[in-house]
Image (spheres, rainbow, N blue to C red):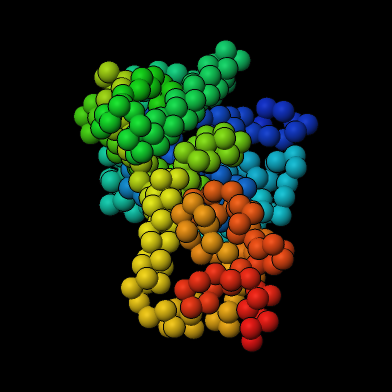
């Protein structure tokens, strides 16, 4: 019936041009980047399910069957098929087998989506689109757009990370030039994507990238690894883009503040001060019982007077608070550790002898 007609139409538009390989024409092309939904694929079953979910959203339902069918065909004809791809094929086959053409009401909605699609195709963002039989120059140009866009995004991640730390002259936003065709090649059209979402209103775009894994999908694992310190703990990157001036600004959110050396230093100094304050103002007998039970071995930093208690810390050659070198005075002439006893530090052997 109607479902078979849709399948027949897909086959008509994707004829097999190479009988030896059996690969349909235009199977691996992205003819209109301005309408692309990023995050579809066939690598694993999880990605297949995500593809079905992404293509179910309003705005792209008009091409859901075509996208799902294309991903299924790509997986089935891949020269190095994996178990994950076979899982994806099974999921796609179930969906395709149960596919029902849209009702009249849905067709009316999809017609509006199709008009929006045509509008995006005619926009300057789609200037580097190509037909079903692209030339080598058109393919090279499309790859160059994507590569340039990934480079600019990487640069924006670095700037956003520095801005968060207040190291870019304390300016709230730093604008970066982002060519529209490269922007489109990286982020695709409006809607929900695997990386997050892309909203277009008049001449303004807003892209929200959710988490480190989404960054990896956009720029690749190798590039993300080089940026690890910049994107560590990233939960959201929001990019505002002017489609007329081609200028973009980014702000970054992390799950927790990055620990700086100054913050770590202050934290340890406060801990040391609190411990020393307790030893001076509190009951020394209680300190002896609670902190240095059973005359536990310890040594004292001669610089900041922090007490290093416990057998493990006897091997420390520097203070864990101020990093000052452990001087010979911290170890007695007997070669044994000092012990805290009634507010004084005495040789462990001396303590044992007095017992």
Q: Determine the residue positioned at 39% across, 52% down.
A: 266
Query: Residue 143 falls in which quadrant of the image?
Result: top right
Using the image as rendered, state which of residue 102 and residue 188 is in the foreground: 188
18 shown above or below 6: above
Query: Residue 240 falls in which quadrant of the image?
Result: top left
175 shown above or below 355: above
Q: Determine the residue positioned at 44% across, 57% down.
A: 268
Instruction: Specify the quadrant that holds the C terminus.
Output: bottom right
Viewed as shown, does residue 245 lie left or right of 224? Answer: left
Q: Report x, y in % for residue 64.
A: 45, 46
Q: Report x, y in % for residue 72.
A: 60, 47
Using the image as rendered, state which of residue 242 and residue 167 is in the foreground: 167
Q: Determine the residue positioned at 49% across, 21% down.
A: 148
129 shown above or below 299: above
Q: Report x, y in % for residue 210.
A: 41, 47
Would you say residue 143 is visible in this rendering?
Answer: yes
Viewed as shown, does residue 143 lie left or right of 168? Answer: right
Using the image as rendered, state which of residue 146 and residue 97 is in the foreground: 146
Q: Determine the residue positioned at 28% across, 31% down.
A: 170
Q: Residue furthest top?
A: 137
Using the image as rendered, state which of residue 165 and residue 241 is in the foreground: 165
Q: Report x, y in % for residue 132.
A: 54, 24
Q: Residue furthest left?
A: 202
Query: Residue 7 falls in which quadrant of the image?
Result: top right
Q: Residue furthest right?
A: 20
- What count of labels does the image hold? 0
Would you say residue 255 is visible in this rendering?
Answer: no
């Amino acid at each position: 019936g109607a479902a078979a007609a849709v399948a027949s139409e897909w086959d008509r538009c994707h004829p097999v041009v190479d009988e030896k390989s059996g690969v349909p024409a235009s199977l691996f092309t992205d003819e209109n980047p301005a309408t692309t939904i990023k995050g579809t694929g066939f690598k694993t079953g999880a990605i297949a399910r995500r593809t079905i979910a992404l293509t179910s959203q309003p705005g792209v339902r008009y091409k859901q069957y075509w996208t799902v069918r294309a991903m299924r065909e790509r997986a089935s004809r891949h020269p190095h098929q994996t178990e994950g791809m076979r899982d994806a094929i099974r999921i796609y086959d179930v969906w395709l087998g149960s596919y029902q053409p849209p009702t009249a009401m849905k067709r009316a909605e999809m017609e509006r989506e199709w008009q929006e699609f045509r509008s995006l195709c005619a926009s300057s963002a789609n200037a580097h689109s190509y037909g079903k039989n692209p030339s080598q120059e058109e393919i090279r140009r499309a790859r160059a757009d994507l590569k340039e866009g990934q480079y600019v995004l990487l640069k924006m991640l670095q700037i956003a990370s520095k801005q968060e730390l207040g190291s870019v002259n304390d300016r709230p936003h730093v604008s970066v030039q982002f060519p529209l065709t490269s922007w489109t090649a990286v982020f695709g059209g409006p809607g929900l994507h695997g990386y997050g979402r892309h909203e277009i209103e008049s001449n303004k775009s807003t892209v929200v990238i959710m988490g480190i894994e989404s960054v990896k999908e956009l720029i690749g694992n190798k590039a993300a690894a080089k940026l690890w310190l910049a994107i560590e703990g990233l939960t959201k990157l929001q990019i505002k883009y002017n489609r007329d001036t081609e200028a973009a600004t980014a702000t970054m959110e992390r799950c927790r503040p990055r620990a700086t050396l100054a913050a770590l230093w202050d934290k340890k100094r406060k801990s040391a001060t609190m411990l020393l304050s307790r030893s001076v103002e509190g009951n020394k007998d209680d300190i002896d019982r609670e902190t240095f039970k059973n005359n536990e071995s310890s040594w004292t930093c001669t610089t900041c007077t922090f007490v290093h208690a416990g057998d493990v810390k006897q091997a420390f050659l520097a203070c864990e608070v101020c990093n000052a070198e452990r001087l010979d005075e911290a170890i007695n002439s007997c070669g044994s550790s000092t012990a805290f006893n009634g507010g004084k530090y005495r040789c462990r052997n001396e303590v044992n002898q007095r017992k």
